[in-house]
Amino acid sequence: AQSVTQLDSQVPVFEEAPVELRCNYSSSVSVYLFWYVQYPNQGLQLLLKYLSGSTLVESINGFEAEFNKSQTSFHLRKPSVHISDTAEYFCAVMNSGYSTLTFGKGTMLLVSP
Amino acid sequence: ETGVTQSPTHLIKTRGQQVTLRCSSQSGHNTVSWYQQALGQGPQFIFQYYREEENGRGNFPPRFSGLQFPNYSSELNVNALELDDSALYLCASSEGGAGTDTQYFGPGTRLTVL
């Protein structure tokens, strides 16, 4: 069985400050890793994903995440956040060979001026 | 390209009733997955359909059932509704049954059971 742990339920940060949202996973097999973002009263939008290759993956809006196999982590980072980044962020894992996602409980990113 | 759509947006039912939620997958996608997101929680996998056949099921009782149609749209049916079934139900579509396929989510149906 696989599981995802998002260590922080809420992360408050000031605008233009850097942020890191932590994600750890457990799985006995190779995995693919995803970050999704959910804005209020909306569905999930894919932010970025790691399937293979370079362990550092980037999104179009400045977020990046690094796959660390030895630490079983996939932390999400952004060097400078905007008010519009306020949302819930979900880390998810998919076992290679399957196509279902296991999600963490989410981290609410609260950006204030 | 049309994204994933779900209907209805909101629904209120009472305990013991039955409900049907609908999902239209993104153009070109033949796989649909359903998730339940309770308040304050991450989405939990209910089941997946690939080319009209069930292709995996999470830890949900049999009163949660589904269908996928030839046009790859899908339904989620829940019988004998319980209060704990109140949640946001999310549908996601992907291109095929491979493990690397990205799942694209719809906006969800908010179900409230009274």
Image (cartoon, rainbow, N blue to C red):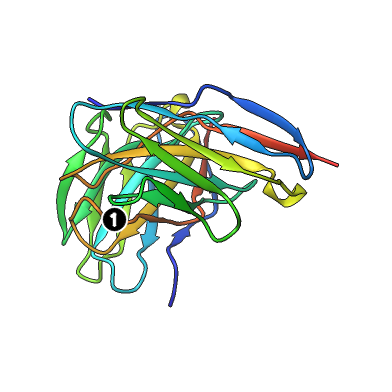
Q: Is residue B112 above or below residue B52?
A: above
On screen, residue B104 versus residue B28, left or right, reads: right
Estimate the x, y position of residue B14 in percent, counting from the top left: 49, 33
Residue at 35% of width from left, 54% of height from top? B103
Q: Residue at x 77, y 45 (%)?
A: A16
For label 1, the residue is B32
**Quadrant of the drawing holding the N terminus of chain A:** top left
Q: Residue at x 46, y 57 (%)?
A: B106
A112 or A38: nearer the viewer: A112
Q: Nearer the viewer, residue B37 or A98?
A: A98
Is residue B11 rendered to the left or right of residue B20? right
Instruction: Tell me which amino acid carries mark 1.
Output: Val
Nearer-the-camera pick, B1 or A6? A6
Q: Nearer the viewer, residue B87 or A14?
A: A14
Q: Give the quadrant of the C terminus of chain A.
A: top right
The residue sitting at the bottom extreme is B1
Question: Residue A67, percent across and down?
Answer: 38, 39
- Against A46, residue A68 (above or below) is above
Q: Secondary structure at mark 1?
A: strand
Residue A50's place in the image compared with A31, above or below, is: below
**Which residue corresponds to the image point at 72% horizontal and 36% vertical from the top-left?**
A110
Residue A14 spot, x, y in % from top left: 79, 37
Q: Label 1 lies in what chain? A: B
Q: Residue B92: x percent and y percent?
A: 37, 54
